[in-house]
Image (spheres, rainbow, N blue to C red):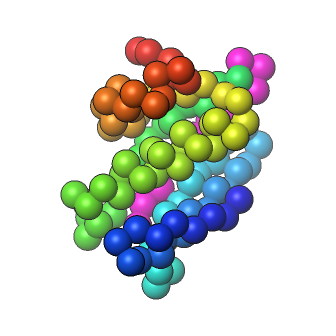
Amino acid sequence: MIFDINKKKRIMRYENQRQGNGGVILLFSDENIEIGRCTYMVIPSESKLIISFVLVHKEFEGKGMGKLLVEAAIQFARENGWKIFPHCSYAHSVMKKMDHVKDILIPH
């Protein structure tokens, strides 16, 4: 799955690379430089996506890129009818502040 967003006149590209029950969502700049990644595991029998960790490369930190990766994971989970358990402390802290994900957030 590849989709683009236009944010502040820059186009960034997400790429979801799934392998079995795991995967990684990659975020690339308009110059095709990797900005960061969000790794996850899926437990189909429980309709659950577990966010393992979110990583943003140093030069892109503090610019909201981690939150964009979490939002991409939320969209992916919603498209598949899954709930999300944010094992990653960053993803957990971001998601608990989002009212629009309370219906799919599995609390710690």
Indicate yes or no whether the magenta region holds residue 85: no
Query: Is 73 positioned to the left or the right of 95 in the image?
Result: right
Residue 92 in the image: state x and y as whole percent.
Answer: 37, 30
In this rendering, the count of numbered labels is 0
Query: Is 56 positioned to the left or the right of 83 in the image?
Result: left
Q: Name the quadrant of the N terminus.
A: bottom right
Measuring 69% from the left and 40% from the top, which residue is drawn there? 79
From this viewpoint, is residue 43 visible?
no
Indicate yes or no whether the magenta region holds residue 45: yes
Is 21 in front, or is 64? 64
Measuring 44% from the left and 15% from the top, which residue is drawn there? 107
From this viewpoint, is residue 101 visible?
yes
Residue 21 in the image: state x and y as whole percent.
Answer: 72, 38
Q: Is residue 78 above or below residue 28?
A: above
- Residue extending farthest bottom: 31
Query: Is 5 positioned to the left or the right of 91 in the image?
Result: right
Q: What span is colored magenta in the figure?
A: 34-46
Residue 77 in the image: state x and y as whole percent.
Answer: 63, 36
Measuring 36% from the left and 51% from the top, which residue is drawn there? 66
- Residue extending farthest left: 62
Look at the magenta stretch and give its main secondary structure.
strand
Query: Is 21 positioned to the left or the right of 66 in the image?
Result: right
Q: Quadrant of residue 20?
A: top right
Q: Is residue 30 above or below residue 106?
A: below
Q: Is residue 30 above or below residue 72?
A: below
Q: Name the quadrant of the C terminus.
A: top left
Measuring 45% from the left and 44% from the top, which residue is drawn there? 70
Residue 22 in the image: state x and y as whole percent.
Answer: 66, 41
